[in-house]
Amino acid sequence: MISGVDHRVPVAARPAFENVATVAHTFCREYLNDEYAQLSVMLTAKLARKRPSPLLRGDRRIWASAVIYALGRVN
């Protein structure tokens, strides 16, 4: 699902990206729609590419909910 697509995520941030993106993607597909699911993965990849990646700190479930909240807020 998420790992099959190349998002150009650095190797050091890849485990955090996989975890956060999977949680956000699963939530969006279950409670929202596919567009939110795709956008949540794209936004998580963007965060993972930042140097240093903020995804490496804190609880990854909180990062997933922050990504979903930010997408909903912008929409």
Image: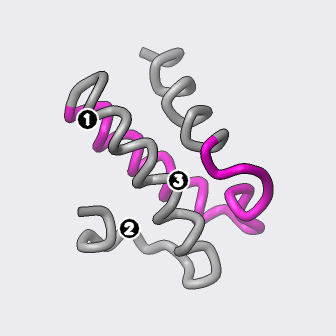
For the magenta stretch, what is the residue range?
34-61
The amino acid beneath tag 3 is Val
Q: Position of residue 28 (x, y in %)?
A: 33, 32
SS under mark 3? helix
Q: Nearer the viewer, mark 2 or mark 1?
A: 1
The amino acid beneath tag 2 is His
SS under mark 1? helix
Q: Which residue is drawn at 31% across and 63% down?
A: 2
Residue at the limit of the structure toward the bottom, as seen here: 11
- Dot placed on the residue nearer the N-terminal end, 2 or 3: 2
Q: Nearer the viewer, residue 54 or 63?
A: 63
- Dot placed on the residue nearer the N-terminal end, 3 or 1: 3
- Dot placed on the residue nearer the N-terminal end, 2 or 1: 2
Q: Where is residue 41 in the image (x, y as percent from the top left)?
A: 39, 50
| 58 displayed left or right of 60 | right
Q: Which of the image's four quarters has the C terminus? A: top left
